[in-house]
Image (spheres, rainbow, N blue to C red):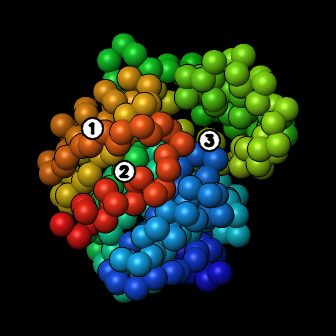
Amino acid sequence: MNTVQSADGTAIAYDRSGEGEPLILIGGSFSERAHPTMSQLAQELSPHFTVYNYDRRGRGDSGDAAEYAVEREIEDLAALVAEAGGSAKVFGLSAGGALALKAVASGVEGITKVALYDPPFVVGEDGPRPPAGFTEQLKELTDADRRGDAVELFMTKGMGAPAEGVAQMRFAPFWQGLEALAHTLPYDTTILGDDLGLPTGLDAVKVPVFVVYGGNAAPWLHASARALADALPESSHHALPDQDIAVDPAALAPELKNFYLG
């Protein structure tokens, strides 16, 4: 494990592997660098890139601040780009992709290409519609140490998962890991916006963007990926056959390699 200091002094933990041009991986909701998707993706890509797989603030071995702000997460990513030599490609999973776009749009220098998987924006009539004050509701639950209730609210109202299925998940072995990251859910909804709509300022993203989505994912995620790609100045999109939200890193890695090196 390595660490880099962000602008506010927070230590950001990362693993570095492989050789080649730098590539930074940004996890999504319920994700940290040790999550199998992120660690396996790093392994798949390390023969072609120097991969920086990091814990976003408040997760894993990274530090945090008393108050959350998207600007601090953007500074974390900028610190990693500087650590990588001042230039890097970036991959973002779900909400991590939204963070990558915000970083580029805000003027972070050195990010040369961005790829996203299943960006969770909602367009049209389909898709989950969180209640008003969604972020504040999540924060109130986690502040009250009602982590399981926060996870359930996020999954049902933010991800559109069936309430019955989520209730059954509470008895699964992995539920404890979800609760451990519950305090970071308001971070992601702050990045995405309470309504989960397409972000503003996409015209400021002046780097090539590749939007990948699971062919078996919900139709609203297909529509989101296409709408996002259409709204960006230089982008393309691709449906990954036989994949859902829980993507197989071995299936995703070749698509990313072709985009970054093509």
Q: Is residue 5 above or below residue 228?
A: below
Name the residue beneath numbered marker 3. Answer: 186
> Marks 2 and 1: in contact by CB < 8 Å?
yes
Indicate the secondary structure of the residue bearing disc 3. Answer: helix
Horizontal and vertical percent position of residue 52: 48, 74
Between residues 57 and 48, which one lies in front from this camera angle? 48
- Residue drawn at x 41%, y 53% is 251
- Residue drawn at x 54%, y 74% is 6
Between residues 105 and 239, which one lies in front from this camera angle? 239
- Residue drawn at x 36%, y 77% is 48
Name the residue beneath numbered marker 2. Answer: 116
User: Left of 220 or right of it: where is 134?
Assistant: right
Horizontal and vertical percent position of residue 28: 53, 49
How far apart marks 3 and 2 lie (CA) works out to 20 Å
In primary-sequence order, the first of circles 1 and 3 is 3
- Residue 138: quadrant of the picture: top right
